[in-house]
Image (cartoon, rainbow, N blue to C red):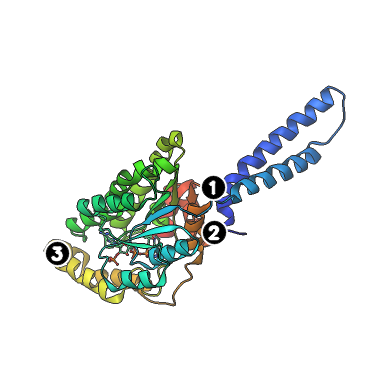
Amino acid sequence: MAGGERPWDVWQRLVPALLFSHAAAVLAASLLGLLGLAHVSTAALFFWFAAAAVGSTLAYHNLKVSAAGKVVVITGCESRIGYALAKRLDELGFTVFAGFTNANDSVGQKLREEASGRLHVLQLDVTSEADIRAAVALVRQKLPSPSAGVWAVINNASIATFGEVEWVPFPVFQHATEVNLFSVVRITQAFLPLIRKTKGRVINVVSILGRVVSPLRSSYCAAKFGVEAFSDCLRLEMRRWGVDVVVVEPGDYTTGKVWINDEKLLEQAKQMWKSMTEEAKADYGEDYFERKIRSLEYYTKGPETDLEPVLKSLTDAVQRTFPLPRYTPVSRAERVQAFVAEHLPRSVYDLIYN
Ligand SMILES: NC(=O)c1ccc[n+]([C@@H]2O[C@H](COP(=O)([O-])OP(=O)(O)OC[C@H]3O[C@@H](n4cnc5c(N)ncnc54)[C@H](OP(=O)(O)O)[C@@H]3O)[C@@H](O)[C@H]2O)c1
């Protein structure tokens, strides 16, 4: 299928079209029979209605906007996903403002060299009020006219934290929530006036961990679940402005030292062990603690994964005239996990996924 959606994403649109075709076929067949005009089977009518409905839904779904003159702001571009997305949108012709925690470091310079002259590297620590204010002012200043606006803001910046609830120092929880949730709120509030001008979109990069829970990941999941709820509320509020709110929920694209490297993992683990109370250390025991930390080494090893599905979902969210509210570039196993989490009793989920 063209585009980045998984087939299950497009089903969000096709299922209502098929249900409508079925209802219309039943109604039309009964009416024709009642009026004695013709005897046509419901199945035949359904086939024709469904073909027309699916065809027009896909045509509507695949419409794209022109990139010319459209401004896109992306946070967290040091990351593999943010960096690749900034390059991709620049290649497609968008005017990209790529946010970096430190705009002067080598990654920002490299992006500047690799991209077109349209791309701007932006100093944007998403926890800094001053950076956010300066970024909005700079984007405003670079717009072609005072009445122009921003087409899309992509909240991508994030930090990965881990540890059982009793182990994670409270300031770590606080910082993870600050970056992963409150910064999304801040950036969105700051850019919404410019986004409303273009009837553009807010795109929040969440995670499948914004819908399913996982032991050792409470500090990350809690914030990502928050971003999901925030996005759904905002989507309802923004309807009257014609602004779309999209969430993209990548699955496990983490192997290959992407999510966290050995060094960072060990450093976080060491700090965590040091800050635990003597009581917690004795109760959990060093063996159990180490075993759990070692289970996370999976995220630091293995070959580099293909980012293409997540990049395509993000590009579609920016480019489609009518984007889906949710893109889920996840594996089949993760899809099943989300289904079990959302549709089966919680005890079943706990049994399988603990
Ligand atoms: N990779 C995956 O498998 C995966 C899976 C599910 C969801 N996601 C989501 O996809 C997005 C990108 O993930 P990723 O794996 O490419 O990167 P990541 O390791 O989660 O890092 C995201 C970026 O955010 C930046 N960042 C951290 N704190 C910041 C701050 N205060 N201000 C501005 N930027 C800050 C990081 O910069 P520094 O490098 O300077 O810290 C990094 O560039 C994230 O939202 C993540 O939650 C990723």
Which one is in front, 19 or 232?
232
**On-image quarter of the C terminus:** bottom left
Q: Residue at x 30, y 56 (%)?
A: 218
Give the residue displayed 61% in from the left and 59% down from the top: 2
Of pointers 2 and 1, the one earlier in the residue sequence: 2
Query: Is the N terminus in the top left, top right, bottom left or bottom right quadrant?
Result: bottom right
Earlier-in-chain disc, 3 versus 2: 2
**What x and y, as percent, mark residue 13?**
59, 45
Proximity of marks 1 and 3: CB atoms separated by less than 8 Å: no
Q: Which numbered disc covers residue 163?
A: none
- Dot 1 corresponds to which residue? 321
Q: Quadrant of ligand 1?
A: bottom left
Q: Nearer the viewer, mark 2 or mark 1?
A: 1
The residue wearing badge 2 is 4
Seen in the image, is 129 located left or right of residue 230?
left
Q: Residue furthest front?
A: 145
Q: Is residue 144 above or below residue 334?
A: above
Q: Is residue 9 visible?
A: yes
Marks 2/1 in contact by CB < 8 Å: the verdict is no
Q: CB under 8 Å between callouts 3 and 2?
A: no
Going from the N terminus, do you reach mark 1 or mark 3 first? Answer: 3
Give SS at disc 1.
loop
Q: Amino acid at mark 2?
A: Gly
Query: x and y percent of residue 304 in the render?
Result: 44, 75
Is 149 or 17 nearer to us in this picture? 149
The residue at the far left in this view is 278
Q: Nearer the viewer, residue 293 or 156?
A: 156
Mark 3–mark 2 distance (CA, rounded to whole Å): 43 Å
Give, as a three-letter code, the residue at label 3: Ser
